[in-house]
Image (cartoon, helix red, strand yellow):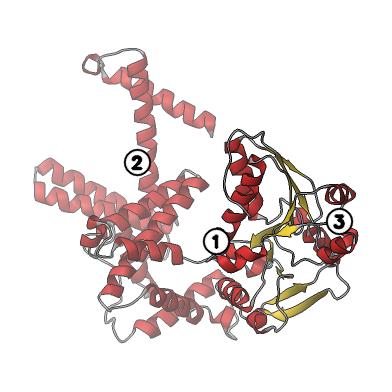
């Protein structure tokens, strides 16, 4: 077959037809009319069940099977076929190009031909045909609208990790291809996951055989008419993985990665994980699920970052982190994973503390051990008081708590009156500590409460700024009464929204 492109010749045309899924009876009438009346017919491959019937009916054709032996891979074969088909049309032939199945279903040569034809302004007509998919849907009794992904075996490495539909893998034509498909699928599915091996669909000896995934490349009858059907995983069985993020972090920390990421240590990253946690709290306060998703991702990034640094030092890996916390959750929930019975959430907390004490008893000598000095001060106060209360160092009711708050308030005022700066700082700390204790009795987390007030102040002050700018006022010329009016307006708007 010549690949030479001749000039000054009236271009021919290209008609692409499908030979159907196998049986001659599934060839469309339109396609049969084209094949029996055409003289320039070229088959991508003559290894198709319909071909014997075409020959018996005196349909003359050529095939491109010889290219499969000459070329190094399928991409080269497909490009060579497309180039030759275009060359023949350029030389004036009315080319009929026939492919197995349907022209637009898992047929890469058709895409190449259409692209080249558009460049050379050659007319291309695609005749609808029946693919093996229609037969398969009928045999399995499935409706593709429920979700089916069709993938050429050559593209198995592009299989989405989060796929949640049924999967059809086409052109599983050899043991080697079956082995590659198996390995790719076993990264997402259990080794014994049941799949369907599909052979000779629509022919007399068609077979749909259930096998375990790990057996796929052990089948002795795989050929060019073999495909694979992988049922969709149930929603409850769908898993996720942090592997992509772990891989990205490994790349960033590699010698040819990012200079900044390479230089980071546990200590240098310390402030970032605190910042990310507070941004999670802000997303929760704002009831913004999209922001919460993003901020949780940022926290996860910090965890993976620290785990990567630890792995490089030989301390532990991300898998160790997951295993450690998983084991802890199982140990501390014996009412779920064991034979312990609990009455309510309070008893769950009590069991948790007892198990934790057993686990940490050897390393913690004081009741207050385990309260990190790195916590924000309000949060640390809350935890200190809660731990002390668990061993009985606490008031029985809220009355004395109010009294203590008033007492600390009076001592603070006295220190301010005296003018003792150091005493004032100490008394102010005592007052805050007493306020945290009140929050504990009111079942309010003080850190969260103060953060909410901070955000409220920001929103109201932003309103004041907008009013000043809208009215083109001068901050220096404004008195507190005017600003207070704007503040009250902001409060009124908040109440209205609520």
Determine whether 278 is above or below 171 in the image: above
Relative image position of residue 75 (x, y in whole percent):
55, 59
Instruction: Quadrant for residue 188, please give it.
Output: bottom right
Q: Work out which quarter of the rendered image holds the C terminus and state it.
A: top right
From the viewer's perspective, is the residue at label 2 or at label 1 nearer? 1
Find residue 359 and report its horizontal and vertical position in percent: 38, 84
Q: Is residue 344 left or right of residue 391?
A: right
Distance between mark 3 and mark 2 Cα atoms: 73 Å
| Depth order, front residue of 317/181 | 181
**Mark 3, residues whose alpha carbon is within 10 Å: few (<14), some, or many (≥20)?**
many
Residue nearest the viewer, comparing 325 with 262 = 262
In the picture shown, does residue 101 fall above or below 486?
below
Q: Secondary structure at mark 1?
A: helix
Identify the mark nearer the N-term, 3 or 1.
3
Query: Which residue has dot 3 on it?
Result: 27
> Helix, strand, or loop for circle 3?
loop
x then y, percent, for residue 418: 10, 43
- Looking at the image, residue 15 sits to the left or right of residue 9; the answer is right
For marks 3 and 2, the one nearer the N-term is 3
Q: Is residue 402 visible?
A: no
Tell me the residue that label 1 is attached to.
158
Residue 98 against residue 481 in the figure, above or below: below
């Amino acid at each position: 077959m010549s690949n030479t492109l001749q000039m000054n010749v009236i271009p021919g045309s290209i008609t692409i037809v499908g030979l159907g899924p196998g049986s001659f009876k599934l060839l469309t009438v339109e396609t049969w009319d084209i094949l029996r009346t055409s003289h320039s017919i070229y088959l991508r491959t003559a290894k198709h069940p319909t071909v014997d019937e075409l020959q018996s009916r005196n349909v003359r054709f050529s095939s491109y099977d010889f290219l499969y032996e000459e070329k190094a891979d399928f991409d080269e074969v497909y490009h060579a076929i497309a180039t030759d088909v275009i060359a023949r049309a350029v030389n004036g032939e009315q080319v009929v190009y026939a492919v197995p199945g349907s022209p637009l279903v898992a047929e890469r040569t058709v895409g190449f031909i259409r692209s080249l034809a558009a460049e050379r302004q050659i007319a291309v007509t695609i005749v609808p045909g029946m693919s093996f998919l229609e037969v398969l849907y009928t045999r399995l009794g499935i409706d593709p609208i429920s979700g089916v992904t069709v993938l050429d075996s050559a593209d198995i490495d592009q299989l989405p990790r989060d796929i949640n539909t049924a999967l059809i893998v086409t052109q599983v034509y050899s043991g080697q291809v079956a082995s590659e498909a198996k390995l790719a699928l076993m990264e997402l599915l259990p080794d014994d996951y049941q799949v369907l091996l599909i052979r000779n669909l629509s022919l007399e000896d068609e077979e749909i055989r259930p096998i375990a995934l790990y057996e796929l490349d052990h089948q002795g009858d795989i050929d060019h008419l073999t495909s694979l059907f992988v049922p969709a995983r149930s929603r409850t069985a769908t898993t996720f993985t942090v592997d992509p993020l772990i891989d990205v972090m490994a790349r960033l920390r590699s010698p040819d990665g990012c200079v900044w990421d390479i230089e980071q240590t546990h200590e240098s990253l310390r402030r970032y994980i605190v910042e990310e946690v507070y941004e999670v709290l802000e997303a929760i306060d704002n009831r913004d699920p999209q922001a919460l998703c993003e901020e949780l991702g940022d926290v996860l990034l910090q965890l993976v970052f620290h785990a990567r640094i630890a792995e490089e030092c030989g301390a532990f890996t991300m898998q160790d982190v997951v295993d450690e916390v998983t084991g802890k959750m199982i140990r501390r929930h014996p009412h779920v994973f064991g034979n312990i019975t609990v009455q309510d959430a309070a008893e769950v907390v009590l069991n948790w503390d007892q198990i934790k004490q057993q686990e940490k008893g050897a390393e913690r000598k004081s009741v207050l051990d385990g309260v990190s000095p790195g916590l924000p001060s309000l949060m640390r106060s809350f935890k200190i008081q809660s731990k002390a209360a668990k061993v009985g160092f606490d008031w029985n009711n809220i009355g004395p708590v109010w009294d203590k708050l008033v007492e600390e308030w009076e001592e603070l005022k006295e220190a301010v009156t005296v003018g003792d700066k150091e005493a004032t700082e100490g008394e102010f700390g005592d007052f805050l500590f007493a306020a945290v204790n009140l929050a504990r009795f009111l079942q309010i987390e003080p850190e969260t409460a103060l953060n909410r007030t901070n955000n409220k102040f920001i929103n109201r002050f932003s309103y004041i700024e907008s009013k000043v700018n809208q009215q083109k006022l001068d901050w220096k010329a404004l008195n507190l009464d005017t600003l207070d009016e704007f503040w009250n307006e902001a409060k009124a708007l908040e109440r209205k929204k609520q």
